[in-house]
Amino acid sequence: MTTYIKDYPRPQFVRKEWTNLNGEWEFRMDDQNEGEKERWFEGLKQSRKIQVPFTCETQMSGIGEEEFHPYVWYEREITVEKEKRKGHKAILHFEGSDFLTKVWVNGRLAGSHKGGYSRFSFDITDLAVDGVNRICVKVEDVPDRQIPRGKQRWIKNNFGCWYVQTTGIWKTVWMEYVPLISLASVKMTPDLAGGCLRVECAVDGVDFMTAFEEKELSLQAEVTFEGRLIAKASAAVMKKSFELKLDLDMPREDEPWGVYTWSPENPRLYDICFFLHDGNGAPDEVRSYFGMREIRVEGEHILLNGQPLYQRLILDQGYWEKSHLTPPDEESLIEDIDKIHALGYNGVRKHQKIEDERFLYWCDVKGMLVWSEAPAAYEFSDEAVSEFVKEWTDIVRQNYNHPSIITWVPFNESWGIPRVKDNREQQHFTESVYHLTKSMDKFRPVIVNDGWEHTVSDIITLHDYEEFGEILKNRYVRYEKEILAGEVYHCGFKSAFANGYSYRGQPVIISEFGGIAFAGQGSEWGYGSAVETKEAFLKRFDAVTTAIKEIPYVCGYCYTQVTDVQQEINGLMDIRRNFKVSPDKIKEINERQVGDLRKI
């Protein structure tokens, strides 16, 4: 991939001039919220050191205090180079900061952002000076159940499957120099049937009322595959947003689609470079990549590139022992993907987290399917609706271009919508989020609400932690009609559909099961009875996994889970990424063909 630059935070939108601002910052807690009143943004005194992007709760931050602190401050100096400023804007980027972030440059406010899981940027050109500049950041986090928080606890101690909170900056901070007239975004949609890539482009820095009296502006795109030029296209830039179409169709005997397709077995990617010309050269150059693949639902099947796809997924919460939600480094992301492949899975359900975009890049490169799931709130209110919709639409837009993402999951197990079973307001909310997501991405399936009590959903997903394979299989085979009619199916209290909704012939996936834990590991827990030996683990894992494969109408599964997470000890690996049982044996069970061979 010609776009790859190690540690580059946004691998699908690459420019040459950038500066990584991770590393040592000044840090100060502000439990009484006195900082703004006392103007700490003009100089952070009585501070300590922290390693960004690791939060103060983690060992890798250098602090490691798990107590909750509602207000925290950061400060560091950056150098803005005079030569690089000529004809450029200085843009400060935050890949993730939880929850309300305010940023000052040289004591002047640059802007603020709400949301812990979407990325954001500030143009600091007019606030910066040539040479040394002081960046000051205040982050406010609250134990509020109305905001999207995922698996972060909101009480003092961990409980159930909720873990230590994540306060403040937890993803990369960086700066880049962007031409005054620049490419703002690209939305790349593969069209297999048409043999082309459709690109929605947006530019920034142009006054379209006067621009064309002075200069001509055009955008050119070049597509290459393994270094060979495949396609070119260009368009005059007459407005802020416009479209490009790149024809890739070149008939090949080994490719019925006429293009190189992306799949888990063969994750082929095209490189693409965008050149924005203003008549005097190319003021902006952006490199990216894309995969040509089609994901769609047809009746009870999910089709990838026109072929039935049987999904062998594993639930992935993305936690590490010493850094919690933040990956220790890029190599740790690669290690997780490689080990998941070694276990025989072809995809992950990234649970209650929007992962570092470098993870999605490596899923694209290595052929790992991804379900992108929203971090949940845990109360329903007007505030909760507003916060969720804003952050979710940002997330969908920001990650749209990744071919590895094949499913959007905005809701899980009725979290944040506790009365969706019979409450019309909450049902309307889920319907609106479904249709809003579809308005932004008409191709990918959308699941509402994963696990049970579905309203409108492209896939019906069920959670079932039954520990005996034969009981699990018989439940779904014997009671198929009752389950798909919305009658109670799980633990006597949940059904597949909310009141007023019914099965419409969608695909069915068991999207949580397993969760097997070993006995003798303290008071921590898994699902069902703990096992004593590796042999007992494999026997039960085989029984429940094979049982799901033998259910005729089920087209995939998601096992819980990749690793142990804090008090939860039901991973196939421990939190340090050591396999608990032989990965080869797990892989053989996962890849063993059972029943309808076309499904596997």
Image: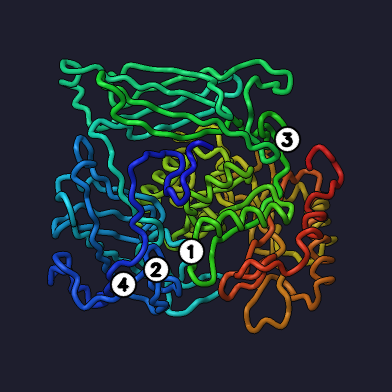
Q: Amino acid at mark 4?
A: Pro
Measured as percent of width and height from the top left, residue 392 is found at 42, 48
The answer for how far apart the CA atoms under marks 1 and 2 are is: 9 Å
- Picture disc at residue 70: 4
The answer for how far apart the CA atoms under marks 3 and 2 are is: 42 Å
Counting labels gives 4
**Which badge, 1 or 4, is on the more N-terminal residue?**
4
**Residue 448 position (above or below residue 353):** above
CB under 8 Å between discs 1 and 2: yes
CB under 8 Å between discs 3 and 2: no
The answer for how far apart the CA atoms under marks 1 and 4 are is: 18 Å
- Picture disc at residue 325: 1
Q: Amino acid at mark 1?
A: Leu
**Residue 298 position (above or below residue 168):** above
Residue carrying label 3: 308
Q: Give the label, 1 or 3, closer to the camera.
A: 1
**Which badge, 1 or 3, is on the more N-terminal residue?**
3
Q: Could you tell me which residue is drawn at 69 percent across and 33 percent down?
A: 299
- Picture disc at residue 55: 2
